[in-house]
């Protein structure tokens, strides 16, 4: 039986996880789940309630009660909180700050992890802080995307300036450092790379370049699986080898500026190969 593909992308704020997650989900035809936006939705619910963020029990219970939904394709993901579209609102500073606080509460994490497993069970690219370690420890491919804090702050500042022209580098850098500290030191599922994660440092690299490296990685990983197929299966083996050869050819023949149809052919072969390898 073929099992759905799960790709985990973890890493600190501003490392480029969302951009890469979206690109990868689109390329592989998978659902994209940005788990950070779920914590942000909980944070907004707290802000709009009379509950204090220091009341772990009340915040945990609120997190279980509210309805959070992620809909739409990877490039236009909409987030709803109790059926209200909050996609833009959850990007504001107050929510960013609050989400960093409430995501340290174990009851909130339990509620979110449960939903994320349910959402992702049919296959997905998920990004967050604990996907490869806690949410889907048996994910097929795990990436840990990092970059030096100065560059992550620069990237965040560019985003922030779209809505707040007065944003400063010093403030953004201080915020990122504080969120890093909370993410990595919390007792429940702190941010860390899973043992088998592929660690990618995106410092000084255009996102497109990192994306190409990521896209190639599953192929490299599957070489091991291919060997297993060679030993174990006769039927699927033949088609696997066929697909593999085709893909190798495309990789060699496909220059950076390949036409879209060639890229599509490459990706449909990748999908077919993944399916065979997971049978
Ligand atoms: O990735 P982001 O900035 O949208 O995440 C918002 C907050 O949620 C951030 O402070 C870390 C937290 N978070 C988490 O604890 N675990 C996740 N899987 C995703 C996000």
Image (tube, rainbow, N blue to C red):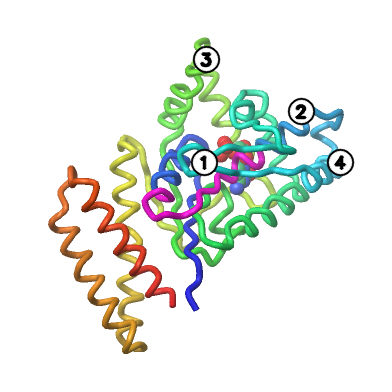
Q: Mark 3 points at which residue?
A: 167
* Real-space Cα separation, disc 1 to disc 3, in angstroms: 20 Å
Label 3 crowd (10 A; few <14 / some 14-19 / many >=20): some
SS assignment at label 3: loop
Q: Residue tagged by mark 4?
A: 58
Q: What element carries label 1?
A: loop
Q: Is mark 3 within 8 Å of ligand 1?
A: no
Question: 10 Å neighbourhood of mark 2: few (<14), some, or many (≥20)?
Answer: some
Q: Report the image quarter containing ligand 1.
A: top right
What is the span of residues highlighted in magenta in the rendered image? 24-39
User: Residue 58: x, y in percent?
Assistant: 86, 41
Q: Of callouts 4 and 3, which one flags the residue occurring earlier in the amino acid sequence?
A: 4
Nearest to the eye among marks 2 and 1: give it: 2
Q: Can residue 38 be seen in this view?
A: yes
Name which residue lies at 36% across and 88% down: 232
Hey, which quadrant is residue 253 in on the image? bottom left
Circle 1 Cα neighbour tier, 10 Å, few/some/many (<14 / 14–19 / ≥20): many
The alpha-carbon separation of the residues under discs 4 and 3 comes to 33 Å
């Amino acid at each position: 039986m073929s099992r759905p593909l799960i790709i985990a992308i973890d890493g600190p704020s501003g490392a480029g996880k969302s951009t890469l997650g979206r690109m990868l989900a689109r390329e592989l035809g998978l659902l994209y789940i940005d788990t950070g936006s779920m914590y942000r939705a909980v944070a907004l619910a707290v802000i709009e309630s009379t509950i204090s963020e220091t009341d772990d029990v009340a915040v945990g219970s609120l997190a279980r009660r509210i309805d959070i939904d992620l809909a739409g394709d990877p490039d236009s993901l909409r987030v709803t909180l109790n059926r209200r579209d909050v996609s833009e609102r959850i990007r504001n500073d107050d929510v960013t700050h609050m989400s960093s606080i409430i995501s340290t509460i174990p009851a909130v994490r339990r509620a979110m992890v449960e939903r994320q497993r349910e959402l992702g069970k049919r296959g997905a690219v998920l990004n967050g802080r604990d996907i490869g370690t806690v949410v889907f420890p048996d994910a097929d491919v795990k990436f840990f995307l990092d970059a030096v804090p100065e560059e992550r702050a620069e990237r965040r500042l560019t985003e922030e300036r779209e809505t707040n022209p007065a944003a400063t580098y010093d403030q953004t850098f201080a915020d990122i450092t504080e969120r890093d500290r909370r993410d990595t030191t919390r007792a429940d599922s702190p941010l860390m790379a899973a043992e088998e994660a592929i660690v990618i440092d995106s410092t000084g690299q255009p996102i497109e370049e990192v994306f190409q490296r990521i896209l190639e990685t599953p192929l490299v990983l599957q070489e091991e699986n291919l060997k297993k197929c060679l030993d174990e299966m006769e039927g699927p083996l033949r088609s696997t080898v066929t697909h593999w050869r085709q893909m190798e050819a495309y990789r060699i023949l496909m220059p950076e500026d390949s036409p879209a149809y060639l890229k599509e052919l490459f990706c449909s072969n990748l999908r077919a190969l993944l399916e065979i390898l997971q049978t």
